[in-house]
């Protein structure tokens, strides 16, 4: 009996799955080896997380050392050096002023904690009416209910869960063509709703799973000003963009703005474990801590997991000791040079590149399944969704592997383009 097909859910899927699920036997650097022996070049870094590739010796050693000392201990009333060392390291790389850290067990949970923190902060300041969030169309912040309520309300799961979701406010998508009506709309939303808004939340510079959209830093600068003007917390979700993906350690650096709250995850643990964190300013933590209920009311069982802290520390050390900026620049140049030519095809609507993120947007979503099977046939792992075929390779990828990925993307897109014409 096929256990996977009969008993195991996969993301956003039916059970059994209507599309093939490949069984992976092992990984190494940027190679995925399937159980049937096929090898695939990994163009996804497991959804933005495995920035150093798979099975990195330094990360492996950090985990092995930690597991012998202590795999996990509850965080209530107890602490440990892995969390202290990781925090010290994070304080060195986080935007100045973000200095209070809450370790959560995933990206979505860190979003929940960010929302709860913002609500508690406003309550503590005697602003109980500030109890909704302002977000933008096209956003993605995770799949838990609170996180879902700030995701794009149209192309997301709102239609499935609307009756149960908190009602938030959405401004126009940040423009990817530098039109200014996005900022005008944002100003209007702030003006009309600021008395109800606890925080404005956005993915900085790149909207990821909501459409892989890259927008200008100016938008974030204006958002920061509006948050100050209208007494609204500025929350940025760096779960996807953080740790170098856009060419800066954190994407907010493109705009030189500092948020009040930031969430991190995905590449935080180098892609080894589910882990995330909410970080905020001292002003926020002081306000919550000196007013009823005098506490940030959240506490996951696996909060501050020692293994996750140890591997995250090792991952950041590895990143800082590497020439990551040059590597990401090189990937960016390659993706721009190689994918740019696709723009001339009828089936291609847009090609977008920033840092190690390369996106081809098609005019239609009808080929997603075809593209998926074609790229695997050509020995590459990519996961198209909707109209998008995109890659986010590990920073350590070789030039040869990069060519495999971009050549495959070009070849499969040209193929569906020619079949359609
Ligand atoms: C992936 C993602 C999340 C959710 O993180 P999980 O670890 O999957 O819960 C939240 N925000 C952004 C921007 C993401 O890309």
Image: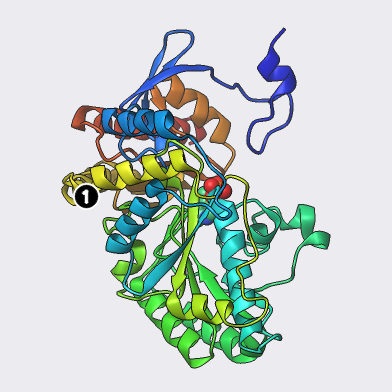
Q: Which residue is mark 1?
A: 320
Q: Residues within 10 Å of mark 1 (few under 14, many from 20)?
A: some
Position in image of residue 272 (x %, y %):
43, 35
Position in image of residue 68 (x %, y %):
41, 28
Disc 1 within 8 angstroms of ligand 1 (CB): no
- Which residue is the extreme one toward the right? 163
Side of 139 where 238 appears, left or right? left
Side of 287 where 258 appears, left or right? left
Q: Is residue 44 visible?
A: no
Indicate the quadrant containing the N terminus: top left, top right, bottom left or bottom right: top right
Position in image of residue 401 (x %, y %):
26, 28
The residue at the point 57 percent across, 46 percent down is 74
Position in image of residue 266 (x %, y %):
45, 46
Query: Is 87 situated above or below 114?
Result: above
In this rendered view, identify the residue nearer to me: 101 or 331.
Answer: 101
Q: What secondary structure is marked by label 1?
A: helix
Number of disc labels? 1
Side of 421 where 112 appears, left or right? right
Q: How is the image coloured?
A: rainbow
Q: Is residue 37 visible?
A: yes
The residue at the point 38 percent across, 48 percent down is 81
- Which residue is the extreme one toward the front? 77
Query: Is 71 situated above or below 23?
Result: below
In this rendered view, identify the residue nearer to me: 327 or 406.
Answer: 327
Task: Answer with the quarter of the image where residue 49 lies.
Answer: top left
The residue at the point 73 percent across, 31 percent down is 14
In this rendered view, identify the residue nearer to me: 134 or 373.
Answer: 134
The residue at the point 51 percent across, 38 percent down is 72
In this rendered view, identify the residue nearer to me: 160 or 50.
Answer: 50
Task: Answer with the quarter of the image where residue 61 lies.
Answer: top left
């Amino acid at each position: 009996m096929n256990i996977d097909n009969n008993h195991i859910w996969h993301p956003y899927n039916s059970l059994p799955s209507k599309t093939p699920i490949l069984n992976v036997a092992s990984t190494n650097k940027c190679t995925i080896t399937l159980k049937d022996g096929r090898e695939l070049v990994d163009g996804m870094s497991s959804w933005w997380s495995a920035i150093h590739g798979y099975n990195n010796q330094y990360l492996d050693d950090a985990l092995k050392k930690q597991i012998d000392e202590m795999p996990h201990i509850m965080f209530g009333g107890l602490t440990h050096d892995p969390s202290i060392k990781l925090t010290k390291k994070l304080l060195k790389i986080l935007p100045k002023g973000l200095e209070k850290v809450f370790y959560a067990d995933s990206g979505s949970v860190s979003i929940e904690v960010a929302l709860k923190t913002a609500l508690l902060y406003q309550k503590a300041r005697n602003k109980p009416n500030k109890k909704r969030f302002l977000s933008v169309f096209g956003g993605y912040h995770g799949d838990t209910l609170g996180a879902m309520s700030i995701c794009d309300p149209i192309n997301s799961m709102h239609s499935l869960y609307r009756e149960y979701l908190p009602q938030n406010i959405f401004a126009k998508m940040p423009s990817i063509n530098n039109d200014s009506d996005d900022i005008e709309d944002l100003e209007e939303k702030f003006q009309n709703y600021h008395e109800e808004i606890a925080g404005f939340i956005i993915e900085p510079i790149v909207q990821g799973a909501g459409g892989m959209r890259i927008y200008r830093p100016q938008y974030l600068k204006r958002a920061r000003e509006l948050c100050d003007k209208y007494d609204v917390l500025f929350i940025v979700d760096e779960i996807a963009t953080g740790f170098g993906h856009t060419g800066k350690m954190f994407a907010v650096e493109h705009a030189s703005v500092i948020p009040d709250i930031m969430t991190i995850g995905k590449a935080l643990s180098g892609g080894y474990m589910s882990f995330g964190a909410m970080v905020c300013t001292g002003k926020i933590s002081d306000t919550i801590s000196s007013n009823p209920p005098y506490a940030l009311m959240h506490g996951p069982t696996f909060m501050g997991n020692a293994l996750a802290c140890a591997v995250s520390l090792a991952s950041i050390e590895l990143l800082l000791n590497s020439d990551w900026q040059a590597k990401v620049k090189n990937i960016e140049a390659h993706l721009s040079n190689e994918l740019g030519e696709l723009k001339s095809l009828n089936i291609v609507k847009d090609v977008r590149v920033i840092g190690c993120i390369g996106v081809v947007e098609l005019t239609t979503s009808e080929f997603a399944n075809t593209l998926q099977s074609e790229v695997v046939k050509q020995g590459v792992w990519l996961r198209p969704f909707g109209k998008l075929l995109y890659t986010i390779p590990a920073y350590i990828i070789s030039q040869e592997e990069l060519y495999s990925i971009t050549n495959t993307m070009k070849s499969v897109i040209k193929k569906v383009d020619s079949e359609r014409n």
